[in-house]
Amino acid sequence: MKNWVKKLAIGVALPGMLILGGCGATKTGGSEKGGIQERTIKAGIGLNEDHPEGQGLKKFKELVEKKSGGKMKVQNFYSATLGDDQKMTEALQGGLQEVTIPSTSPLVGMIKEYGIFDFPFVFNTEEEAYSVLDGKVGKELLKKLPEHKLIGLGYWENGFRNLTNSKHPVKTAEDFKGLKIRTMQNEVHLDAFKKLGANPSPMAFSEVFTALEGKTVDGQENPLATIKSSKYNEVQPYLSMTKHVYTPFVFLVSKQFWDKLSKEEQKIMRDSAQEAGKYQRDLNRKENEKALEDLKKAGMKVNEVSDAEKEKMKEIVKPVTDKYAKKFGQDLVDEMMSEVEKARKK
């Protein structure tokens, strides 16, 4: 009887052990053998949920969860809930957060070459920018991220930056003089505004509205969709269509997290980021058009800046561009400008 019980116990235990062993193999061997596991992806951005970037992030969540059959879940955090761009990027490097989509500007302190996207008056249209971002130059810069514990899955759109202020319309280069303008902590932006005669004041994006409201600064510069979603029209009467810089977003993933993913999971992430990026770019362009009309209706005094005046501004800041072209790599800058010229001839 004892032998029979013992055999029965072994017979029951072995299948159970095999089942458990199989689960363990799937769980620990996912990155080597493929498959999709239960995962939670914490994704944070600095802008509001209703901004095109926020809507793009919602699309990314929807795509990842659909493509993974609900196994990979994305938790979205908006409005700098997890910190500003720099803090969230550092959280990715430390493996504390999985995804963030900052402007390229804050990355310059880590990878100087990203500073080429801060050069004033390089692009005239979004298509010109796409030719650089989605081409050889953009891909070369993405390759520099892994050594900094980051993976780049492509570029989304922040867009052309325009100036708002509480003093007067900016129609000419001379109109910049004396204006205290909030900028990002970015040496190209700082030097360019100084060259134009303004007083740039770097601060975190989350602090800008309060600074404008309290007159700590006179103005700020951002794309139209950001100006609208941040409600800057409530504290800034003047909007000048300077289109002085085109700023991309870069879709970043923690390398620590990425390396744990199977190839199948990595493909889901990459495909979803790129598909959501196309959606976000289209939405951003539409929203910028709508934002301009809404800001006018809200009472902002909007003025255009002539091409001739933009050329004057470009000439004034040329020494800044030349200085940083040498710093970031003249060959890289030349390649970017060559791509822009090709795009203009199409």
Image: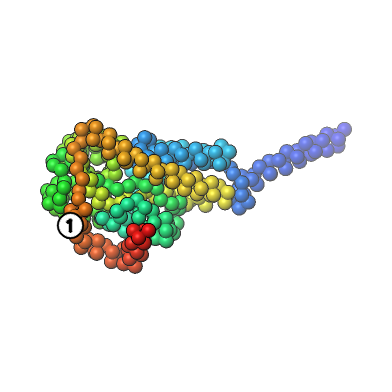
> Helix, strand or loop at disc 1?
helix
Q: Residues within 10 Å of mark 1 (few under 14, many from 20)?
A: some
* Depicted 42 relative to depicted 198: above or below: above
Residue for badge 1: 312
Instruction: Where is residue 40? Give x, y as percent.
Output: 51, 39
Instruction: Where is residue 304? Give x, y as percent.
Output: 21, 45
* Depicted 42 relative to depicted 311: above or below: above
Instruction: Where is residue 29? Give x, y as percent.
Output: 62, 49
Residue displayed at 26% across by 49% down: 243
| Image quadrant assignment for residue 6 | top right
Q: From the image, which quarter does the N terminus lie in?
A: top right
The figure's colour scheme reads: rainbow
* 135 with respect to 30 (left or right): left
* Depicted 116 relative to depicted 251: above or below: below
Q: Residue furthest front?
A: 346
Residue displayed at 48% across by 39% down: 61
Tell me, yes or no, if residue 6 can be seen here: no
Residue displayed at 34% across by 64% down: 338
Q: Nearer the viewer, residue 146 or 221?
A: 221
* 70 with respect to 61 (left or right): right
* 181 with respect to 276 (left or right): left
